[in-house]
Image (cartoon, rainbow, N blue to C red):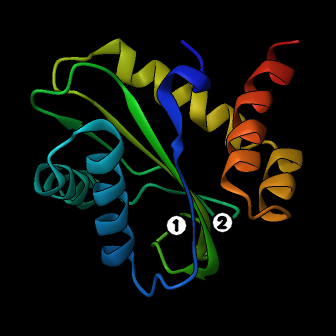
Amino acid sequence: MNLGSILKPEAVRVLGSVTSKKRLMRDLSDVAAACYDIDSEAAMAALQDRESIGPTGVGNGVALPHARIPGLDRVAGVFMKLDRPVSFDAVDRVPVDLVFGLFAPEDSGVHHLKALALVARALRQTKVQMKLRANDDPLTLHAILVDAQESEAA
């Protein structure tokens, strides 16, 4: 499993008008629907259910919202860079501007956890965060994310 197999280039977006955590979840769900044929309402409900267990803002302006979706046949990702950070109830209380949404099949078990760990390892790297924040081109952002995993493995 690698980030290139989880994250399609067209599922990478730069957003300038997100004003709330709920709006961000809606945008993640809508992009997942457009790129992976995931039901937007099911994705939104699953993300909100997961957030009710505990916030997925992991610190340093990064959030990793994730959910299991009935009927999904593979792990799929959506990455969003926000022009203006939004409050996300993160562990360090820092608003988030780098968001990787992860959607997994309902019965994915260990594959979901492996994908989440893969994304977390890539996004916890300070160099990767700096590169992501310094770029606004979705294709460049995709390349940075895919390269982050490859450089970490080296």
* Residue type beneath disc 2: Gly
* Residue 60, quarter of the rendered image: bottom right
**Mark 1 neighbour density, 10 Å: few (under 14) some (14–19) many (20 or more):** some
Q: State which mark lies toward you, 2 or 1.
A: 2
Q: Are marks 2 and 1 in contact (CB under 8 Å)?
A: yes
Q: Secondary structure at mark 1?
A: loop
Please tell me the numbered disc located at residue 90. Answer: 1
Against 76, residue 18 (above or below) is below
The residue lying at 36 percent from left, 66 percent from top is 27
Specify whether residue 30 is in view: yes
Which residue in the protein does label 2 denote? 61
The residue lying at 22 percent from left, 19 percent from top is 73
The residue lying at 44 percent from left, 87 percent from top is 19
Judged left or right of residue 14, residue 105 is left
* Residue type beneath disc 1: Ala
How far from the left and from the top, in percent, is residue 153?
Answer: 80, 14
The Cα atoms of the two marked residues, 2 and 1, are separated by 8 Å
Against 106, residue 138 (above or below) is below
How far from the left and from the top, in percent, is residue 30?
Answer: 29, 59
Please tell me the numbered disc located at residue 30. Answer: none
